[in-house]
C-alpha cells in the first residue's frame, strides 16, 4: 500500500491538491482513499459533496473520509473515554466538562494512524492520500508513533504491572478509579498499532510527504522549516507543489506587472532553496471550476501523464553506515547551522537530537548500545554522528 501525505501552511491549497491527486489515482485504476485529519474539514467542499462520519464512495475506485473525533471516541475509544470521564468526575469535575476533557488534542492523528494500519493489514486500498492539518499538527502526527514507541519501551511494562497490583490492593480502598483491564487492553492495541505503523512511515518507498506552498516569502520560510523537521523525523519529502501561481497571460496585464516581478523573485527563491527536489507548479486558472472538473484540471496540470504513486525520491533521510572502523549515523538536516543543533545521549540505548522547536528521540541499534560517541560533523546539509564500538 502507498501512503501520500500532503501538508503545508494553512490556506496554501493542501485539500485541493490532495483531492486532485486522489481523483487522478482512481482514474488510473488504483483503489484510492482520500482521508482528512484536519479538525477544520474542507474535504467535502473540495469534492462538492457532503461527507458523514463513515467512508463515502465518491466514484469508481475513489472513497473519501473526514475523521470525526467525537464519533471515533464513541465507537473506537469508548473504554478510554469512559475511564477518563469517571476519573475526572471523581475529582469533582462536572460530567459534561469531563466528557469534553476526555477528547485529548491529537486524537484525530491517533485515529488516522489506526486507519492506516488497519487498511494496510486488510489490503483495503492501493493508495491512501492524506490531507492533513497545517504543518505543526502534521509534525505531531508523523512523530507520534516513534515518540510513543520510545516511551512504551521504557515505561509501559512497568506501568502495566503497577496497575494490575494497584487494582488488587489500593483500588479496593481508594475512591479514585483505576484503569480496568479493558482500558489496558485498549492501550495495548495502541502500543501495537504505533509499532506497526512506524514501519510504514519509515519506508521511503511506501510513505512520502509532499509539501504545498504559495510563492510568498513567509510561506516559503515555513516550508523550509517543515522540510527540516520532517527530515529530522526521518520522513521522506519527495515533492514540492507551488500552488496558486498566477499565469503568464494575467501577469502581462498592467495591474499585475508589479506582482509578476514579485512572483518571479519568490519562484527563484524556492528553486534556490529546494533544488534539486522535484518542484511542480499549479496555477490559479482553475478557480472558476468546482468539484470533479476542478480536480481533473488540477491533477492534469500537476502530474501531466505521470503516475502520482511514483516517488520522486526514495531515499531515507536517516541512515546508519560503517566506514573505517567507525559507525556513522547520517541525518539529512537542510537549512540548519551546526550551532542550531543540540545533541545528547539519554542512556545507552537512545540519543536525542534537538533542532529548533522539535526534538527527536532516536533508539540506537543493539550494536551501538555500548558504543562511545566520538563527535559530530556537518557536511553538505547532513549531520554525521560518529560512534566507536567498545
Image (cartoon, rainbow, N blue to C red):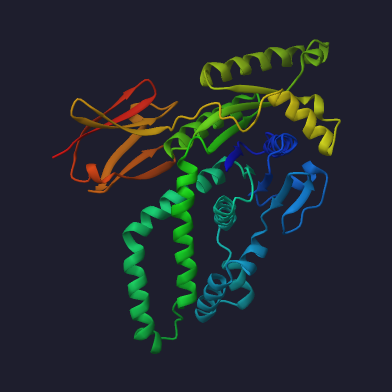
Question: Quadrant of residue 308 in the image?
Answer: top right
Viewer-proximal residue among 66 and 199: 199
Nearer-the-camera pick, 278 or 252:
278
Q: Is residue 244 visible?
A: no
Who is closer to the viewer here, 46 or 115? 115
Q: Position of residue 111 (x, y in %)?
A: 58, 57
> What residue is rendered at 45% in x and 46% in y?
199
Vertical comparison of 384 with 50: above or below:
above
Screen quadrant of the N terminus: top right
Identity of the residue drawn at 56% across and 36% down: 209
Task: Assign the C terminus to one quadrant of the image.
Answer: top left
Residue 374 left/right relative to 186: left
Residue farthest to the bottom, as pictured: 173
**Viewer-proximal residue, 143 or 272?**
143
Q: Is residue 251 left or right of residue 138?
A: right
In which image quadrant can residue 85 be found? bottom right
Where is residue 136? Give x, y as percent: 54, 43
Where, by quadrant of the figure, is residue 250 drawn? Answer: top right
**Picture coordinates of residue 46 (x, y %)?**
78, 41
- Total numbered circles: 0
Amino acid at each position: 500500500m502507498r501512503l501520500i501525505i500532503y501538508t503545508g501552511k494553512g490556506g496554501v491549497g493542501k485539500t485541493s491538491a490532495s483531492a486532485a491527486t486522489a481523483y487522478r489515482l482512481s482514474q488510473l485504476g488504483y483503489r484510492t482513499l482520500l482521508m482528512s485529519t484536519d479538525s477544520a474539514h474542507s474535504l467535502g467542499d473540495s469534492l462538492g459533496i457532503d461527507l458523514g462520519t463513515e467512508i463515502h464512495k465518491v466514484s469508481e475506485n475513489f472513497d473519501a473520509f473526514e475523521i470525526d473525533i467525537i464519533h471515533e471516541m464513541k465507537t473506537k475509544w469508548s473504554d478510554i473515554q469512559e475511564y477518563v470521564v469517571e476519573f475526572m468526575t471523581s475529582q469533582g469535575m462536572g460530567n459534561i466538562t469531563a466528557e469534553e476533557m476526555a477528547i485529548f488534542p491529537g486524537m484525530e492523528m491517533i485515529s488516522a494512524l489506526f486507519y492506516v494500519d488497519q487498511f494496510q493489514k486488510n489490503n483495503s486500498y492501493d493508495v491512501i492520500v492524506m490531507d492533513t492539518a497545517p504543518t505543526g499538527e502534521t509534525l505531531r502526527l508523523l512523530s507520534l508513533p516513534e515518540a510513543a514507541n520510545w516511551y512504551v519501551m521504557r515505561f509501559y511494562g512497568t506501568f502495566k504491572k503497577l496497575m494490575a497490583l494497584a487494582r488488587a490492593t489500593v483500588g479496593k480502598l481508594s475512591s479514585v478509579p483505576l484503569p480496568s483491564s479493558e482500558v489496558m487492553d485498549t492501550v495495548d492495541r495502541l502500543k501495537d498499532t504505533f509499532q506497526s505503523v512506524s514501519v510504514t512511515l519509515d519506508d521511503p518507498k511506501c510513505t512520502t510527504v509532499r509539501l504545498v506552498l504559495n510563492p510568498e516569502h513567509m510561506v516559503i520560510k515555513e516550508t523550509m522549516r517543515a522540510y527540516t523537521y520532517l527530515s529530522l523525523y526521518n520522513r521522506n519529502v519527495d515533492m514540492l507543489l507551488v500552488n496558486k501561481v498566477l499565469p503568464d497571460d494575467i501577469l502581462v496585464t498592467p495591474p499585475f506587472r508589479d506582482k509578476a516581478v514579485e512572483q518571479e523573485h519568490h519562484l527563484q527563491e524556492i528553486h534556490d532553496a529546494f533544488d534539486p527536489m522535484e518542484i511542480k507548479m499549479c496555477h490559479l486558472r482553475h478557480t472558476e471550476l468546482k468539484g470533479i472538473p476542478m480536480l481533473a484540471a488540477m491533477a492534469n496540470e500537476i502530474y501531466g501523464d505521470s503516475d502520482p504513486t511514483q516517488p520522486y525520491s526514495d531515499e531515507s533521510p536517516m541512515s546508519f553506515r560503517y566506514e573505517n572502523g567507525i559507525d556513522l549515523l547520517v541525518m539529512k538536516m537542510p537549512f540548519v547551522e551546526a550551532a542550531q543543533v543540540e545533541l545528547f545521549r539519554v542512556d545507552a540505548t537512545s540519543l536525542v537530537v534537538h533542532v529548533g522547536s522539535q526534538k527527536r528521540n532516536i533508539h540506537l541499534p543493539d550494536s551501538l548500545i555500548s558504543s562511545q560517541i566520538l563527535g559530530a560533523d556537518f557536511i553538505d546539509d547532513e549531520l554525521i554522528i560518529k560512534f566507536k564500538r567498545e
